[in-house]
Amino acid sequence: MSTVVNIVIYGVIMGGVYGLIAMGLTLQYGVGKILNVSHGEFLMLSAMTSCTLVKAGLHPLLSFLICLPAAFIIGFIINITIYRYLRKVSKDEATFESNAMLMSFGLYFILANIGLKIWGTLSKSYQYYSYPVKILGATIAVNRLIILAIAIIFIVAFFIFLNKTRIGKSIRATSQSTTAAAMMGVKINRTMAICFGTGGLLAAAAGVLIGMALSPTAQVGLSNTVIALIVVVLGGMGSIPGAVLGGLLIGLVGQAVSFIDSSLVMVANYLMVLILLLLRPKGLLGR
Amino acid sequence: MTMLEVCSVNCFYDNVQALWDVSLKVEEGEIVALLGANGAGKTTLLNTVTGLVKPASGHIAFMGESLDGVKSHEVLEKGIAYLPEGGRLFPDMSILENLEMGAYPKSLWNSRKSSLDRVFEVFPLLKERRKQMSSTLSGGEKQMLAMARGLMSNPKMFLMDELSYGLAPIMVTEVFNIVKRLKEQGITVLLVEQNVHQSMEIADRAYVLENGRLVLDGQCNILLDNDYIKKAYLGL
């Protein structure tokens, strides 16, 4: 019984983090048609920066205030420079989409190597509420529960942002019809830059959370990009609720499978995506 | 007072000339129809007014103010609403959210509540179903919503592209009736249409565009008796 509780609680915790990462990736793709392979590097840079700052004496929660705005600004600037230029020189949307993905591979190499250069391959960690509590017979570290709580806060806040604010509505409008949104007076270039920056911010939020308990290294970027991709395909490209649902699924399945054999987790993830793509190519909540 | 003045506009797509020296005028309170077959350049002309397409030469003025080089969101704020061909709604947004997007520019956003009340008076059905996703509406309802969304910016002038296209005959009559009501409320309308007969019935004047050139214009009651119009557009 306590094993099942353990799997469910840890699954939900990882699901929340995955959901956060995947929301960022799906936002960048849904609005800007950029499949951002460097997404996980934003997470890595934020996780490592946060750990370094906390080691130097900063409160873990305060590191959000540094990592998140920094990630947003970097994403925003990358978008208005590289991607805006790329969009201008691409002859159509399909060309831009493939060029943008290739460009993000380049960004991945640059950012990943910056991380390796600064932090090497050793993991970073710090102690933050790292003592256990008992919940329904399962033993859970308190910091994991904090991670879950913060992930939920971010996910809910992001939903409110998208559905209730003027900018949020313009983002959804742009993802549904760029032309119509432009006709309504939405400044498309700026909206796309905001989305790319926000995507980076969400990855950075997940990065700080991972830094709290999971001892990240400068190599965690790519594996998280891959997981985010799986989650996004599972949930439906461009669907934000799909990203959260997909994240939960991957989190739960990952924990369940790793209880049997942790080397089979990715196998299970890919199998799940394969089966789903055969049954429902649009993904769970795709349109 | 002249609402819209288009003066000797030439326009190109790559190397193909889409508009040749087109000039037209719309007076305040009028309904003017811009008629012509597919590919005649009607939508291009509207796009030059809304700032989506830049003319190679010529001038456009709205209420005496030049629109040359003005961006599309500024055109909207100056009081020109645009209903694009096919409505171009946001499919995964509710009726209410689609309407809100019609008041997106900052200067309009804060007064969107009162704009909504005004629009719901013209379209009570939309008020009842404001939570419904726009993708679930019928063709006629979608055009109504597109009109309503245009009205959210409280326009002085409304450009409508193919309002009646693809609608059942009874819905065509209904949307044209709404256009007449907008005129009564003092909104000037430029109606781009392929439905020549019915649009001439509600319009005051009409221009006929063929292969990017204006070939005819005049009062609708006179044009309806024109032999060329009868033969080429009314099939009489």
Image (spheres, rainbow, N blue to C red):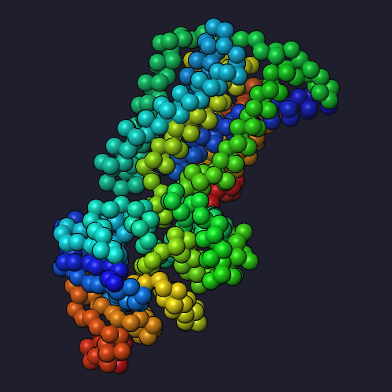
Viewer-proximal residue among A3 and A110 = A110
Residue at 46% in and 9% down: A120
**Rendering coords of residue B8 (x, y %):** 16, 66
Q: In this rendering, does residue B183 appear at all?
A: yes
Residue A37 is situated, as x and y percent measured from the top left of the image, at 43, 30
Q: Quadrant of residue A59?
A: top right
Residue B163's image quarter? bottom left
Quadrant of residue A252 in the image?
top right
Q: Is residue B88 rendered to the left or right of residue B219?
A: right
State the image coordinates of residue A189 (x, y, percent, origin top left): 36, 42
Q: Residue at x 43, y 13 (%)?
A: A116
Q: List x then y, in percent, for residue B203.
A: 35, 81
* Residue B192, visible in the rendered structure: no
Quadrant of the frame with the C terminus of chain B:
bottom left
Placement of A271 over or under A184, stated as above or below: above
Image position of B148 (left or right of B69): right
Against B199, residue A202 (above or below) is: above
Q: Give whichever of A117, B194 is nearer the camera.
A: B194
> Does residue B56 sit above or below B5 in this rendering?
above
- Furthest-front residue in view? B1
State which quarter of the image contains the N terminus of chain B: bottom left
Q: Residue placed at 65% from the left, 32% from the top?
A: A152
Q: Is A57 on the left or on the right of A32, as rendered?
A: right
Number of marks drawn: 0
Tell me the residue at 51%/46% (across/down): A166
Residue A187 or residue A204, whichever sits in front? A187
